[in-house]
Image (cartoon, rainbow, N blue to C red):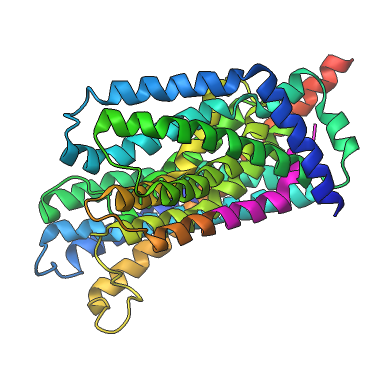
Amino acid sequence: MTKSIARAAVLFALIAATAYLAFNYAPIEKSMGVIQKIFYLHISCAFSAFVAFGTCFYANLRYVFTREPKADWLSVSAAEVGLAFISVVLVSGPIWAHPVWGIWWTWDARLTLTFVLGLLYLSYLLLRSMIEEPDKRALFSALFGIFAFLDVPLVYFSIRWWRTQHPQPVILGGPGSGLEPRMRVSYLLMWGALTGLLILLLSARYKLEALRASVEDLRREAEVR
Amino acid sequence: MALFANTTVLLGKELRTEFRSRELLTTTVVFILVVIVLFSFTFDPSVGESRKFGPGLLWLSFLFAASLMLQPCFLREQNNDTLSALRLAVQDPFSIFLAKLSANTVFLLLTEVLMLPIFAILYNVHILAVFPQLVLVLFLGSLGVAIPGTAFSAISAQARMRELMLPLLLLPLLTPVLIASTEATSGLLAENPGLRIDWLGFLAGFDIVFLTALWLFGEYLLEE
C-alpha cells in the first residue's frame, strides 16, 4: 500500500518536473507559439493509449487460447486505462486545433481513427457490463476485442484515402522531420513519465480486478453453502 | 468438401425459415422505406443535392436496417435451444457461420435491390445505366456488413439489452464499409458515372480480413 503511494508520488513529481521543462526549458515554437506546448501531453497520451489498446488485444487473444482469468483482468484494465488516455487526447487535440487550424474538430484520418477507436472500446466495456456470467463475459468480450482491433488499420486507411489534414508525423517522419534538441528532451521525458503513469494505472486496475474476481468467487462459495 | 455440403444444407434451412414467414424481409423493407422518406425532410432532394448526400444516406439506412435485421440470427437458435444441436450436426462449426452469413447477405441484397428503384425515384438519381455495377457494390458492401454482423449477433445474443448492444458493437466497426460503399456508390451516381475500383478492392479486402477472423475464431463464438 505505502509502496504504491510512494510510486504514485514519484511519478507525480516526474510529471510536474517534465511539465516545468516543457514550459520553461523547451523553446517556443515559431509558427504556433505557446499553444504548441500541448503537443508534449497530446502525443505522449496518444502513445500510451495505443500501447494500452495493443495490450488489450494481446490479452484478448491470450484469453481466447488459454482461458486464464488473469488475461481477462489484464484486458479490462488495459481497455479502461486506454480509454482514459484517449479521452485526454480527444480533449487536448481540439484545444490545440482551435487556435492553429481555426476549427475545433476536423474529420481527418487520425482524428477520426482516434474517435472510432474510443467508441469501439467504449462498446467493449459496455458489452462487458451487459454479460453477467464471468466466463461468458470474458470470452465474448475478448472475441469482440479481437474483431475491433483488426478493424483499426482498416478504419485508418479508409479515412486516409478519403481525406486528411492532421500534420504529418514530426517524429520518425522521414527526412526533414525531427525536433529541436531541447524540445526533444522535454518530449522524451514527458513520454517516459506518461508511460510510467500507464504502467502504474494498469497495475492498480489489474489488482482491483483480481480482488473483484476473488470477491465474486467467495460470494459464490458462500451461496453454495 | 464436408464444409461445402454442410453449408449448403444449412443455407437451405436458413432461407426456408425466412421465406416461409418473410417476417424479416418485410419489416426491413418497410424500415428502410421509412428512413429514406424521413431523410428527404432533412435536406432539399434536388438532383445536385441528392448526388451529394444520397449515397451516404442510402448506406446509412442499410447499415441501420442491417443492425436490426441481424438480431434474430443467433437469438432464434438460442431461444429454441437448437444451437448445440446445430454444432453436433456439422463437422466444422465454420459452416454454421458461412450458411448464416450467406443467408444474411442474400436478405440484405434482396432488400437493397428492392429499395434502390424507390430511392432513385424519390431522390431523382439515375441508376438504370449503372445497375449491374451498383449491384456489385451492394454485394461487396452487404458482405462486409454480414460477416462481422453475423459474428456479433452471436455475441449480442449472450448479453442483456441485446437489441441495443448489436448496433452499438457493429456500427462503429463498420466505419470502413460505410466510407468505401458510399464512395463507390457516389462514383456510380455522379454526372459522369465511373466504377471506383480502388474502393471495391478495399471492400473486398475488408470482407477477406473479417472472413478470415471469423474462420479462425468462429468456433469460440458458439461456446455456451
Magenta stretch bounds:
B207-224
Q: Quadrant of residue B154?
A: top right
Q: Report the quarter where the C terminus of chain B lies.
A: top right
At x 72%, y 30%, the residue is: B14
Number of numbered discs on residues: 0
Q: Is residue A135 visible?
A: no
Choose between B85 and A11: the one closer to the eye: B85
Magenta-drawn stretch contains B220: yes
- Identify whether B129 is placed above or below A27: above
Q: Quadrant of residue B209?
A: bottom right
At x 37%, y 33%, the residue is: B117
Choose between A165 and B18: the one closer to the eye: B18
At x 10%, y 62%, the residue is: A33
Which SS type dominates the magenta stretch? helix
Residue A126, image x, y percentages: 53, 30
Residue A73, image x, y percentages: 66, 42
In-image side of B198 versus A97 (left or right): right
In-image side of B96 versus A23 (left or right): right
- Identify whether B176 is placed above or below B68: below
Q: Is residue A224 visible?
A: yes
Choose between B168 and A225: the one closer to the eye: B168
Q: Report the quarter where the N terminus of chain B lies.
A: bottom right
Q: Quadrant of residue A164?
A: bottom left
Residue that extends furthest to the bottom in the rendered view of this protein: A175
At x 83%, y 15%, the residue is: A223
In-image side of A67 versus A131 (left or right): right
Residue B99, image x, y percentages: 72, 40
Choose between B3 and A80: the one closer to the eye: B3
Residue A138, image x, y percentages: 69, 38
Magenta-drawn stretch contains A209: no
In-image side of B205 versus A214 (left or right): left
